[in-house]
Amino acid sequence: MDGILQSLGVIFSFSGLAVLIIGALLGIVIGALPGLGPSIGLSLLIPFTYNLGPELSMLMMISLYTSAEYGGSISAILLSTPGTAAAAATAIDGYAMARKGKANEAISISLTASTVGGVFGGLALLLLAMPLASLALKFGPAGYFAVGVFGLTSVAALSGGSLVKGLVCAAFGLALATIGIDPIAGTPRFTFGLFELYEGVPFLAALIGLFAVSEALVMIENRVAAAPVIKDKVGHVFMSGALWKETWRSMLSGSVIGTLLGILPGVGGNIACWVARDYARARDPHPEEYGHGSANGIAAPEASNNATVGGALVPLLALGVPGSPTTAIMVGALIMHGLHPGPQLFTEAPSLVYAILFGTIIASLVQYAAGSLFLPLMARVMRLPDAVIAVGIMAFAVLGAFAIRNLMFDVYLMLGFGVVGYLMKKLRFPVAPIVLAMVLGYLVESNYRTALVSSQGDYMIFITDPVSLLFLVLSLVSLLTPLWRALQARRARRIDVDEAANGTVR
Amino acid sequence: MMNKASAVSNSNLSPAPGGEAIRSHFWQNLVAAGIFLAWNASFLIMSFALPPGHSRGDVGPGSLPMQVSIFGLIVSTVYLIQVLRGMDLGGSSDKIDVPRVAGLLGLFIAVALSANWIGLALCLGIGTGVATLLFPGQKPFVRALATGVGFWVIAYGLFGKLLELPLP
Amino acid sequence: MTINRRTFGTRMAGAALGLALALSSVALPAPAMAAGFPEKSVTLVVWAGAGGALDTYGRKLAELLEKESGWSVKVDNRPGGSGAVGVSQIMTQPADGYNILVFTGTLTFGIAQGLIPFELKDFRMLRAMQSEPSSLAVLSDSPFKSVDDFVKYMKENPSGLKVGGHAPGGFHQYMLYQLMKSGGFESGWIPHDASGKVTLALLGKHIDAAMMTPSTGLAQVKNGDIKLLGVSTDKRSEFLPDVPTFKEQGYDIEGAVWRGIAVKAGTPDDVVTSIQAAVDKVTASADWKKFQTEQFQDSPNWNEEEFTKRAESDLSSQLEFLKANGYAQ
């Protein structure tokens, strides 16, 4: 109890609020800059938190972490350039909405959903850290494999017009995911002796090329000097009641999915965003709106990627094991203050633990306030002429690709993906399945093989492992449902066509 | 039916009605199907060259790439068949504006390549400035100068100085 | 209009050229005068991304070099290529000591597997400053109470337990291989791609035993959920006085994954002497000692000669291990 009061005292002190606000502002900017994500942001921040004391420095880091997850969506919406990998799903509907002249609305949805997701993840962390931690332990390699397969089943939903084209793209993405050093045998594959490819094709370089550069190339083809599209009034952050009514379900489902997936080590916002989008789409009465600026297509992934923050902190606090690169940096920071994370922290430094628990929730609220400050600025970005925006996309793409690993190689690779993405857009190939397959390919392969090594080649492990069985069944369901619906639709259409042939054409 | 819908959306110019558009889509899609078949075939051949696994129970480094490329071959073949049967799978109906697209791309490739000599920040500044000239609009030079200087400041100040990235 | 564009272009080009010249003259490497080394800021090239254990060490070293020796130091993260990116970064720079590589013991594994296209003689290995051992870990409710129990069981049931750890063909599997040779048993290896996942796999009973760095599962080691049967240090570690070494239990295994610094071969002796002197000041400082304790790091403090010898013997025995397990030809 003392711990709780003490921690609230720290959070609501002048310096507590100050570090939260600074963290949020930095986080939004760093998240929005492509190539820079929460983990780079935190490691740049660490030196400045030496003198802050453990509570304040953790508050600042959590605030930055949360806001960076939101910040990624800003550039995704405005420039079709996902600032972080976790904002990739948002780019699809967010950018479509912004092009329709509703950038302001898109950003307010993203900000609200991020806040809702963050608060939800924080609440789950606060109330359920211990029971949820046992969830992280239940997942063995077979379970992770099945989660990956489940994620892959959403390719169909991302395919847009032609399912075949979507599958071709998924195969392309999976092939790209196998490039690099093999996760089990340690053999370099398809690297052509380039050691820049040992860790695989850098995901963000592919992402920025496929989404952003291709978009800039499409923009230059507009011969007419397009007037700035945005005619929105600047600066309102509040979502209308109608929007709330439209999106609350996907925000909630996104939050739950994000929290649960965030707990699993190695599965973060970059995967949660796709699963959440797919889930929301499957249950939406208007699934055809997705990809053309659907509000739910922003709300679901954005709620989920912020909810992963609370989820990722669960194994850190309950077990002392970091579940993501970002939380690993937090461990480093705690160690700097002479503390070692783990269950013993609850007795050793209760005020710190509660500062982290409450901080996660409050950081989300601070992020909302800080995010609303940026809104007028962002609306102004959209008022810039197309020329400047397209060129800006290119410039940020170059800088972002370089910032991933400080390698020019990634910039060349990113430009190459830009050309591929441009040609694919021209041919109406959906690029999202490539990205999804790249994220999940590694998860699926490494865990598939680890599972087989640990069972010494016995395939039954995928059925005897309950988690694996559950997700494999779910995947089957999610594959068969659209097929079933398509069959029914075809039957219905046949009747339509017959009627049309008999009757008059409208 | 769905395919046509996707072909119309996103493009501001409505596609030329009738056989001509479908015909051009036919060639576009045929070439794409050919490329994907070739890609998957070469991937399959390369994955045969990978060594077998050496841990007990491991299926080896070549196994997944093989499965993926076989899957890829199958879906590309289906794609090819659909194209040959004359289904309109959608494609670009207006000509690609080659000089401008190539210009923008070439400019940024030049930026990336020359970054090692005169620095990435400066390159980007010049590159972005010149690139805006490729776009129509009023007062192109003022715009070019402002954009160039703006992005030089962002690259040098924000990325180079504040974030301490070792820009070349 | 065209004239306008042309003059503008020429001007920009002229300005660019002028600026480039000005920059390059500043950046031109001054001849290394050892007496005054360093005359400009020194770069620590960390071959891993920001935030990991190696980066933490690199940044602390940078901070203390500035504080204790008055140098100006920049940290440059060059992750990628299993270290090859970082190594090439210093190899493409002149051998003047201004680019110091901050790297780990995986160097020898990388060279042995042919992933890092350089040899040990391309480096001057200046100092190993941190090291961490491997340990054999099981859950506390496991029937095994000592390394002997474990070895006996594995002898009777070859590959009967799921043993795993961080990375395929890396340091921890290498230590298991040493134990296998010394104990005369066979075991498989279940690789994990992050050290945190090893702890979780052990706690979730997805593996039966792990070879891992003791500090990875520190919370569980401390509260007794995880039991360490043996540790690969020469003498008992000061951080884990209750954990017996492999040597004590009759298995002649010793090894540690180290972190240290190196420069390109051909760096003049007087420059190296200046660097060594600066590092000596760092390792003698109270800040450094406090840092090492907090991070649970041993301080091998091997000098250039010993460090090089260690790396050479590591390389040859690791090459044998990698060949035996199919990781290298």
Image (spheres, rainbow, N blue to C red):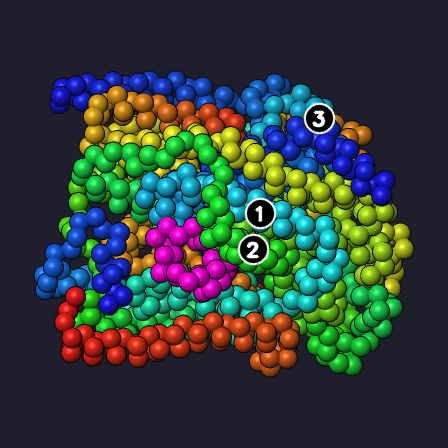
Query: Dividing the picture into quarters, in which one does residue B3 lie?
Result: bottom left
Is disc 1 placed on a helix, strand or loop? helix
Amino acid type, callout 3: Phe
Q: Earlier in the sequence, mark 3 or mark 2?
A: 3
Location of residue A92 in the rendering, given as x and y in whole percent from the top left corner: 39, 51
Is disc 3 placed on a helix, strand or loop? helix
Q: Quadrant of the N terminus of chain C?
A: top left
**In which chain is the residue bearing label 3?**
A
Task: Give the distance between the C-alpha atoms of the residues marked 3 and 2, in whole angstroms.
Answer: 32 Å
Q: Is residue B117 left or right of residue A445?
A: left
Query: In this figure, which residue is indicated by the disc labeled 3?
Result: A14
Q: Nearer the viewer, mark 3 or mark 2?
A: 2
Residue C200 can be seen, yes or no: no
Q: Residue at x 41, y 24 (%)?
A: B153
- Residue bounds of the magenta highlight: A275-297
Give residue C182's mark: none
Give residue A116's mark: 1
Q: Residue at x 43, y 53 (%)?
A: A297
Of residue C249 and residue A78, the one placed in the foreground of this image is A78
Of residue A178 and residue C168, the one placed in the foreground of this image is A178
Query: In this figure, which residue is indicated by the disc labeled 2?
Result: A252
Q: Earlier in the sequence, mark 1 or mark 2?
A: 1
Task: Give the distance between the C-alpha atoms of the residues marked 1 and 2, in whole angstroms.
Answer: 8 Å
Query: Dividing the picture into quarters, in which one does residue A98 lie?
Result: top left
Amino acid type, callout 1: Val
Location of residue C45 in the rendering, given as x and y in whole percent from the top left corner: 56, 37
Q: Residues within 10 Å of mark 1 (few under 14, many from 20)?
A: many
Up-down: is A116 above or below C3?
below
Location of residue A449 in the rendering, given as x and y in whole percent from the top left corner: 56, 70
Of residue A79 and residue C69, the one placed in the foreground of this image is A79
Q: Earlier in the sequence, mark 3 or mark 1?
A: 3
